[in-house]
Image (spheres, helix red, strand yellow):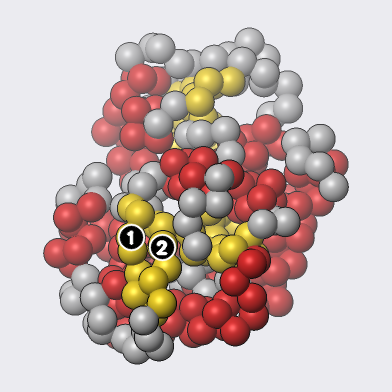
Amino acid sequence: MKSLNLGFSPCPNDTFIFHGMTHNLVDTRGYDFELTIADVEELNSLARNLYCDITKLSFHAWLRLRESYEILDSGAALGYGCGPLVVSGGRRLKEDSVIALPGEWTTAALLFRIYAPQCKNLRYERFDLIMPKIASGEYDAGVIIHEGRFVYKNYNLELIEDLGNWWERKTSMPIPLGCIAIKREHGYRLKSDIEEIIKDSVLYAMKNRESSRNFIKSHSAELDDNVINEHIALYVNDFTISLGRDGREAIEILKRHAIDAGIIGV
């Protein structure tokens, strides 16, 4: 049995997707998975040192690491109406505003830098601390991800821009947020096997939605069932089963915008 290090986040969409293949509920084709469950920005950081064989990455991180990691066709978080949100405690966005971003290599950070290139006073903060720190006045505004879009009003925060809607207006394409990637050194056969295993795990999760509930709740920062269900419904979709032509085109468009903005190299 071949052992592989698999990294994914504790967010409900990831634990929902990977529950089947990490609990022997689908055929894993003789592979065994050693789990690294960490915030996506930590996974982005670990990938710089090629720590995981297979890992969740922000698309921004993958664009920087694409010579070492290859995107898998299944498991991605990509879609419509699911982008990061720019929020504030009522202040308008200005050039000198202090902005909290959820990690330097997150797609949220990349999108904000394309959206508001005039804002240079950026601070990188753990995603779950951004809302309370905006509410306390430590930051003027920030970009929130994951479950934050469902609960930011609980902190009396106001929406400045939905970066997903902004992206869709700009490109008419789905917004690429996160992908599952595999080390290029593993080659085509292993890549193909893992793509099929993840696809099977996604389909199992979709058909057996309550099966993963305890696993999801054991890792989620938000335990409310309605929030968890909304999160999964938003981030797990047909693009998670397969990127398809539109998904791959959206990734290429994101790459071009990042290069044109001088954020990543060619």
Going by the numbered disc 1, the residue's amino acid type is Leu
Q: Name the residue under label 2.
A: 6
Left or right: 148 as drawn, with respect to 85? left
Residue sitting at x 67%, y 32%: 113
Left or right: 54 as drawn, with respect to 129? right
Q: Mark 1 points at which residue?
A: 35
* 23, above or below 141, in the image: below
Q: Residues within 10 Å of mark 2 (few under 14, many from 20)?
A: many
Labels 2 & 1 near each other (Cβ < 8 A): yes
Residue 107 position in % (x across, y down):
58, 45
Q: Observer-nearest residue: 189 or 134?
A: 189
* 25, above or below 225, in the image: below
Q: Observer-nearest residue: 226 or 197?
A: 197
Q: Observer-nearest residue: 235 or 7?
A: 7
Going by the numbered disc 2, the residue's amino acid type is Leu
Residue sitting at x 19%, y 76%: 211
Q: Residues within 10 Å of mark 1 (few under 14, many from 20)?
A: some
